[in-house]
């Protein structure tokens, strides 16, 4: 009995200490740590689910051969480039919705949500139509030196992907609006529906029916259509914070669109040029052969595993900082950014320590040829070592700056570092010097470091506070 009482007292003491630490670092006048965790935990689960499913899907397509893996990796580098444009435009909506939420204007944030869906849907439809119509020219321009088997698989996957762009655009716009009001549980469930059915269809079409890239196309179209329908039904019939009406989507409000696009367009341009640089480095890798493409695709999947916590902090920062800016509490904004950076770095360290013993098994999921395994391990060791030091600061801080309306600076800084360091240095290290695919990845890590320094200096100053998005 005495032991139980002492144990209960010890647990109570630990709990009290933990609450004090959380109140000191994750609570402010705008919101307390319980509200912050209510936003960040669903995002953490969502990002973990997305990354694990991406890993699983890459592993499943590997059963169709290295040409299929290389093709999917190539096209996905283009898809990521395009999807990030949709996410960037949706983020403009997130910022405006969050700031109006912080200011307590429910009519305005409901209108901002509808206009976000209208803008992203229209733009995603136009991009999808363009990519579908010019798929051969795009593949020839970007990956013309790839082997014919790779190109044939890539053509099929690109057409299927482009048909789904409008579906993805609607899903991202709804998610952006919901994150703006802190409804991250809803975004988690909608993501589970879309991605869970994607895995289920992949098991059926890839593992059971052995349909290869065709099966992957059927899976993504079916799952994204279901995701879009569920997102719109949720907004219209279930969600009660945002008042959503379809007529508000059709009826454009150019004043509200201007506010959304003030954030969304610079961020979209940043993502286009940033991911365009990544896409250009992919063309370097094509010159190194199919083995290098396969290494790059596998490393892209594995390198993101420790970033789950940072990705959730990154998304949470937009909502939390946006709401702080909406009620003009800049001290809270600074405090929360520092806390998110520490939290993100700690999460990376913990995940790396957990994953490191299982790295050989994780690599084995992709069934790579023995000749490329050493290259995969070297890249993953280097990347995982640098991630906790550089990745959180290079991505969470600019998200906070965008949430404050400082999108133009983040655009200029990101483009400068991408093109001068990741692209140019990547070409020098990977192609001119004898470092190959490893050199391309080292250049990317160096670029993280420079980004971190630039954004840290900006945030320590006060110019990011000089924006008024609400009028």
Image: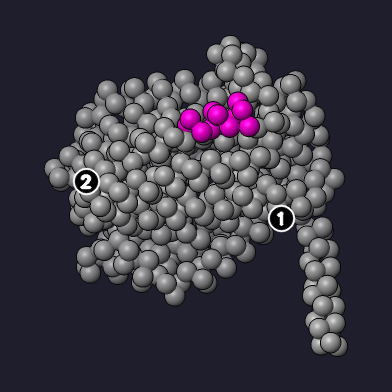
Instruction: Please state which of the two labelled residues, at mark 1 or mark 2, is closer to the viewer.
Output: 2
Residue 131, magenta (yes or no):
no
Residue 164: x and y, percent? 37, 31
Quarter of the rendering containing residue 24: bottom right
- Res 392 → quadrant: bottom right
Residue at image coords 51%, 33%? 230
**Position of residue 42 in the picture relative to residue 415 (left or right):** right
Q: Residue under circle 2?
A: 211
Q: Vertical placement of 261 versus 217: above or below?
A: above
Query: Which corner quadrant holds the C terminus?
Result: top right
Whole-percent x, y for residue 219 in the image: 33, 41
Task: Compare residues 388 and 260 and report the one nearer the observer.
Answer: 260
The residue that mark 1 highlights is 339
In magenta, the rendered stretch is 228-238
The crowding category of the residue bearing disc 1, from other C-alpha atoms within 10 Å (few below 14, some 14 to 19, many at least 20), is: some
Q: Residue at x 59, y 20 (%)?
A: 115
Query: For the view shown, which residue lies furthest in the left direction?
Result: 148
Foreground pick, 123 / 40: 40
Q: Residue at x 22, y 49 (%)?
A: 209
Q: How many marks?
A: 2
Question: Does the segment drawn in magenta span residue 234?
Answer: yes
**Predominant secondary structure in magenta?**
helix
Upstream in sequence: badge 1 or badge 2: 2
Asked whether residue 241 appears in the rendered view, the answer is yes
């Amino acid at each position: 009995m005495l032991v139980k009482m002492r144990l209960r007292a010890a647990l109570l003491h630990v709990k009290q200490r933990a609450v004090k630490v959380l109140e000191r670092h994750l609570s402010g006048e705008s919101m307390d740590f319980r509200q912050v965790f209510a936003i960040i935990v669903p995002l953490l689960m969502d990002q973990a689910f997305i990354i694990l499913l991406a890993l699983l899907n890459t592993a499943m397509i590997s059963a169709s051969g290295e040409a299929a893996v290389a093709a999917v990796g190539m096209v996905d580098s283009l898809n990521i480039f395009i999807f990030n444009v949709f996410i960037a435009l949706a983020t403009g909506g997130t910022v405006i919705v969050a700031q109006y939420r912080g200011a307590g204007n429910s009519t305005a944030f409901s209108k901002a949500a509808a206009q976000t869906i209208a803008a992203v849907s229209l733009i995603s439809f136009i991009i999808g139509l363009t990519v579908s119509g010019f798929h051969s020219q795009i593949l020839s321009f970007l990956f013309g030196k790839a082997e014919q088997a790779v190109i044939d698989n890539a053509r099929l996957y690109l057409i299927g992907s482009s048909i789904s762009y409008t579906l993805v655009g609607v899903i991202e716009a709804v998610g952006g609006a919901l994150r703006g009001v802190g409804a991250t549980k809803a975004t988690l469930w909608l993501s589970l529906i879309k991605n869970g059915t994607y895995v289920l269809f992949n098991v059926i079409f890839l593992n059971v029916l052995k349909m290869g890239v065709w099966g992957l196309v059927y899976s993504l179209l079916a799952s994204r259509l279901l995701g879009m329908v569920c997102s719109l039904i949720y907004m219209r019939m279930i969600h009660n914070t945002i008042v959503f009406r379809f007529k508000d989507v059709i009826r454009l409000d150019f004043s509200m669109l201007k506010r959304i696009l003030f954030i969304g367009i610079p961020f979209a341009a940043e993502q286009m040029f940033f991911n365009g640089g990544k896409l250009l480095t992919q063309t370097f890798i094509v010159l190194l052969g199919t083995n290098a493409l396969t290494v790059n695709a596998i490393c892209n999947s594995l390198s993101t595993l420790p970033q789950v916590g940072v990705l959730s902090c990154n998304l949470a920062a937009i909502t939390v900082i946006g709401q702080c800016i909406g009620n003009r509490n800049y001290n809270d904004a600074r405090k929360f950014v520092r806390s998110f950076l520490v939290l993100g770095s700690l999460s990376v360290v913990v995940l790396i320590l957990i994953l490191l013993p299982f790295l050989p098994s994780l690599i084995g999921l992709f069934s790579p040829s023995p000749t490329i395994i050493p290259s995969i391990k070297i890249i993953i060791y280097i990347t995982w070592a640098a991630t906790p030091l550089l990745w959180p600061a290079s991505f969470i801080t600019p998200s906070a700056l965008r949430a404050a309306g400082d999108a133009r600076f983040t655009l200029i800084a990101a483009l400068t570092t991408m093109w001068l360091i990741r692209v140019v240095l990547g070409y020098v290290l990977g192609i001119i010097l004898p470092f190959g695919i490893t050199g391309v990845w080292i250049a990317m890590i160096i670029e993280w470091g420079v980004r971190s320094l630039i954004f840290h200096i900006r945030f320590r100053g006060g110019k990011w506070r000089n924006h008024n998005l609400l009028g």
